[in-house]
Image: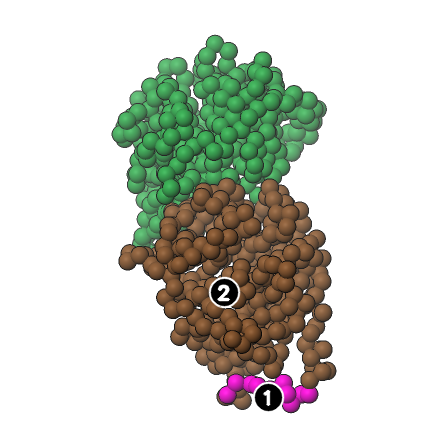
Chain colours: A brown, B green
Amino acid sequence: MSHVTSLLAVLLPAANLFAQAPAGSQNLSPAALATRAKVQNVPEIPYESVPNFLKMPANLYLGEGIGIATNSKGHIFVYTRSQRTRLFEFDQNGNFVREIGEGLYGFVFAHAVRVDPQDNIWAVDEGSNMVIKFNPQGRVVMTLGRRPEPADAALPSPAPDPANPGKYIFNRPTDVGWDADGNIFVTDGYGNSRIVKYDKRGRFITQAGTRGSEPGQLNLPHSMAMDAKGNAYVADRSNRRIQVFDNDLKFKAIYDNVGTPWELCISPGPHQYLFSSNTFPDNNDYTLAGVTGEVYKMELDGTVVGKFGKAGKQWGEFSGLHEIDCRNPDVLYVSEIQLWRAQKLILHPSGR
Amino acid sequence: MKGSGLFCAVVWVFCGLLSAQAPEIAFDGNIDFLKLPANIHLGEAAGVATNSKGNIFVYTRSGESGVMGASRFFTYGGSRLFEFDPAGKYLREIGTGVYGFLFAQSVRIDAQDNIWAVDRGSNNIIKFDPSGRFLQVLSRKPESVNPTGAAGGGEGRGGGGRGRGGVPGQGVQGDSFNRPTDISWDAQGNMFVSDAYTNARIVKLDKTGRFVKTWGAKGSDPGQFDMPNSVAVDARGNVYVADLGNKRIQVFDNDGTFKTQIANVGAPWAICVSPGAHQYLYSSNSNQPDALDNGEIYKMELDGTVLGKFGTAGKQAKEFGTANEIDCRNPNTLYIGEVTNWRVQKVTLRGAR
């Protein structure tokens, strides 16, 4: 399934490639043209947003809505850059339950939160360079990586070595996932350009990736997801492609037709789907709003089955979509950077 | 760190063989011993100690530090001191918001149950009475600590202080420390401070806090140190220094005269001498924070004879994540402060001989 693009280019008449292009696309900036997803004529999946689903207590606010995940009971965890980085839990109706990890040493600058099959909560913090595992009760039970000591401290953290990033030190990690055996996978990240595999006790097994654009190389692995067979899907953001690795982190495939993948999610169950967000980054170049913002629903082999959403600030639109929870592939929770919010989305894939 | 390889090359047999032959000591490790309130979490648990009642004190890096200022920085916060009862029940916080709590390094309890917090960020060693009231402080927090490392934060990496530049305490007959790591006392109440990373020395103070003498400098010769990370004193007043970078424990008499060194137990991050008629010496060959190598803790006679070892580096129970302090008030019930695992582990040695 590598290089879906070239396949499509052969199958589709060239004229059709732009047939569905958004209005005004003839005025797109070079950045916008490069960002636009190559896949075209993708069916729209009808959907709706549940406005103001999360009920915040009067004295609590979300900041940048960086991470969102649900557990097996339907509780929702939001990892946000508020006044500090904070982790909040809500029940299945959106009622606030509690704060987790208040004042935690590893909470510096939130990046992602995920919940494993045992309902442990994992926070990925790119500011402390740590991946922190909480048990369902909200206590820390494992840490990966280490928050650098203050620069003024006597033992400054060693300067990052891109060629040898170290087994247990991250440089702005981005995401975490698990296979059926409980092995832990971490995308690392902004500083390093790799995916690392640990066993369930947190011992290093292997890693893959160096910075670059060749197959197997990575340039800002920004998100990841595991399928039931133990394959790892990496959102290779700056290379504008999804890369698939097997369980030993051997390169398998590239899907490069769905724009710039900021966020990946794979739904559970017998028929798994891969969701990928071609995220509208920010308002610096608003022409990007015309060619980004949509989320793709794919088969695991990269076949695009539909898309939904667009850039914008209304409910149902996305501004800096940063994490997707797809435990139920028809009821998604998404968090956004720019609008300091999370949304609950109801998808109607059969057009109901 | 570089001197250690050379040293081990010279006495290769001791470095390699003796520690490898040490028998394994059977033990249990309880990582859920301390019960914390829902809104309190340990960070890097650099320091742990018990008092005569068995209460447990944990000095942890909580990380919620702040900085004010631009042309001149003021740094505050970042570490907390908690007290638990002997069953692990949370009792209270001590020293909330105190001026010198920046970057926890260790905590020790003296013979009168006073609590001493050693802070590597502020250079302070802060004494609290058993009720938690402030009594005394050693050294001085630099006026301007720049945690970003950018210009404008004083005098280089040491953070300066005193507004004069240079490394605090260097060449000075006094208690101005630069990154102190530990404190212990002899039977007369004299204090011995390991002043670690730049000064690489031991400072002896009398029981009132008056400077007595200092010895040591950066290096690998006998009497020199490379990151003295821990200090302990036996009943006779001998001073044991964990010379981490040189991978040896150096032993001095009460006046700082070099006596011997113990170089077959890896890189000692934390050492502890148990009380009582038969004293033991514990030393942790801790893993570096970016690796999971080593991690075993040795039990020795005071003369360095290795009786056994236990544990390894890791993240599970009975494994240690960069052990930075050992409490051995009871030689068979140890408390281990772990940096990278953010926890205190209660270790019970079994089949003690």
* Front residue of this view, candidates A190 and B260: A190
Secondary structure under tag 2 reads: strand
Instruction: Check disc 2 and report the residue beneath it.
Output: A332
Give the CA separation, mark 2 to mark 1: 29 Å
Q: Given the image, what chain letter belongs to the residue carrying mark 1?
A: A
Q: Given the image, what chain letter belongs to the residue carrying mark 2?
A: A
For image coordinates 35% across by 27% down, the residue present is B115
- The percent position of residue A236, horizontal first and vertical second, equals 60, 65
Count of numbered circles on the image: 2
Image quadrant occupied by the N terminus of chain A: bottom right
* Front residue of this view, candidates B298 and A139: A139
Instruction: Check disc 1 and report the residue beneath it.
Output: A19
Residue A217 falls left or right of residue B282: right
Query: Dividing the picture into quarters, in which one does residue B290 lie?
Result: top right
Query: Dividing the picture into quarters, in which one does residue B173 lie?
Result: top left
For image coordinates 41% across by 34% down, the residue present is B35
For image coordinates 68% across by 88% down, the residue present is A13
Secondary structure under tag 1 reads: loop
Membership of A21 in magenta stretch: yes
Membership of A262 in magenta stretch: no
- Cβ–Cβ under 8 Å for marks 2 and 1: no
Considering only order in the chain, which callout, 1 or 2, is on the residue closer to the N terminus?
1
Badge 2 amino acid: Leu
Q: Residues within 10 Å of mark 1 (few under 14, many from 20)?
A: few
Q: Which residues are magenta?
A: A13-23
* Front residue of this view, candidates A191 and A80: A80
For image coordinates 65% across by 21% down, the residue present is B23
